[in-house]
Amino acid sequence: MQAMLSEIAGQAIADANVSETAKVQKKIILDCLKGEGRDKVEGFVPRYMAFPIASYDPAKTTQIGSDWEIVKTLFTGK
C-alpha cells in the first residue's frame, strides 16, 4: 500500500502517512485518482496490471513477471 501511495501521491505524502491505516492510505489514493482535494492523477495503472507486469515488492514476483524476463529480449532487443 505504501509503495502505491508513493507512486500516486508522491514520496512526501507517503512518508507523512506511513503510520496511518490501510483504510486511510486507500482513501488518499482514491482522492488522487478522482482529483478530490488533491492533484488528479491521470492514466494510472497499477504495476501488476501494466505490461510488462511488475511488482511493488522487489522481493516478490509473479510467475508471469519471471517469464517476461526470459523473453524480454525477443521484444525489446535489450
Image (tube, rainbow, N blue to C red):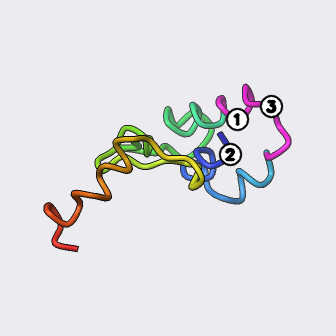
The answer to the question of whether label 2 and label 1 lie on touching residues, with beta carbons closer than 8 A, is yes
Amino acid under label 1? Answer: Gln
> Mark 2 or mark 1: which is in front?
2
- Report the span colored magenta: 18-27
User: 21 above or below 59?
Assistant: above
Looking at the picture, how far across and down is residue 75, in whole percent?
Answer: 14, 61
Which is more toward the observer, 41 or 37?
41
User: 11 above or below 8?
Assistant: below
Amino acid under label 2? Answer: Gln
Q: Quadrant of residue 12?
A: bottom right
Q: Which residue is mark 3?
A: 21
Q: Residue at x 71, y 52 (%)?
A: 13
User: Which corner quadrant holds the N terminus?
Assistant: top right
**Label ID, residue 25:** 1
Hey, which residue is sitting farthest right in the picture?
19
Q: Residue at x 37, y 48 (%)?
A: 65
The answer to the question of whether label 3 and label 2 lie on touching residues, with beta carbons closer than 8 A, is no
Q: Which residue is mark 2?
A: 2
